[in-house]
Amino acid sequence: MKEFWDAIEKKDCEKVLELLDDYLEQVEDEEELMRAAKTLEGLAIECRSYDLAHEIAHLYAHMGEEDIFRPYRGILEKSKGDIEACAEALYHLAEAYEHFGFPEEAVRSYEELLKMEEDELERALTLAHMALAYEEMNELEKAIDFMEKAKGAFEKLKDETNYLVSLVDLAHFYYGAGMDEKAEEYIKEVLKSPRGTEIDVNALLVESEIYAGRGEYKRAFGNISKAMLQALEAEDENLFLFAFDTLLNFLDEMFAEKEFRGIYENVGILVEAFEDLNKDYGNFFKALGELARFKEGQEDAKERFEEIYSSIEDEELREILDEFKEKGIKFLNVGL
């Protein structure tokens, strides 16, 4: 505890961040915690530490503080007169608004940022952020407009990575707006030269949404299977979990809509992909197929489901199956 306060006194923001979690575990008194947070707010502003501002914002949110963005605005105020520092502060403020679920405020900050930016790449990235914020507000027309502008800028700059990311985002927006053909056009452009990266995984997942919306479940399951396997090949656990959660969400909707045949006739694609790679995952997908048969009314599937269920050692996978049996899905951090 003394080391933590010594670091604050020395204005050593990196050390404070290093010790913050240990300090928070020891503090039980809310008033002391609030005093510490306000002290840290001043330090974050003085150091222009966005990492510390982020931690304080979370602290304020936890304590029910009305204005959790004061550290960011304090840094912004301190940065006035320095265009580069001011632009950086506006960007981090906008990003914080997005993170904490305030997309309208994020858009206003990005609009201010656009007035200051001269670098074409930074302007393009800001346009893309604005598009994502509008998508959060379900204003898809504006989201598409801003992301199309960003896409054009990335193409002009020959920034292939951001150009491809913008295509995936646009495909998602167009699909949400009911413009499937445009969405598929952009996805095919991304996937025509596979890279085995996060971009490909996200493109496959968006395309699976399009296929599922048309009732083309075989193609949808095939895409999700490819996405999960590519994430594993890239040794990216978070990307795998994202693809797996997408699958769970997809299955949840199918169960809710009583598309049982669509599940048990196509889940074999996932069984085949994973049964040799990970026994529990293979059995998990088999169990889903039998559960779908049982929910459709095939009584003999109940015994098969229970037998497969009992063979699964991963408790979290069993819990997901329990949720399917009862009321829906529980999203869990499960990995291979």
Image (spheres, rainbow, N blue to C red):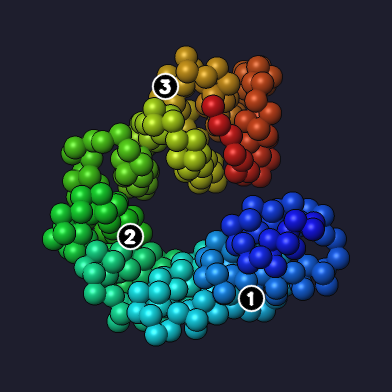
Q: Which residue is mark 3?
A: 273
Q: Quadrant of residue 108?
A: bottom left
First in sequence, mark 1 or 3: give its number: 1
Amino acid at the residue labelled 1: Gly
In this view of the protein, which residue sits in the foreground, 114 or 332? Answer: 114
Identity of the residue drawn at 68% across and 61% down:
7
Screen quadrant of the N terminus: bottom right
Task: Give the class, few, some or many, for how many residues have Cα within 10 Å of label 1's Cα (few <14, many ≥20).
Answer: some
Amino acid at the residue labelled 3: Ala
Q: Which residue is mark 1?
A: 42
Task: Give the class, few, some or many, for how many residues have Cα within 10 Å of label 3's Cα (few <14, many ≥20).
Answer: some
The reply to whether callout 1 and callout 2 are in contact (CB within 8 Å) is no
Q: Position of residue 298 (x, y in %)?
A: 58, 26
Q: In the rendered view, tell whether residue 261 sits above or below residue 280.
A: below
Q: Is residue 49 visible?
A: yes
- Residue mark closest to the camera, 1 vs 3: 1
Q: Which residue is mark 2?
A: 173
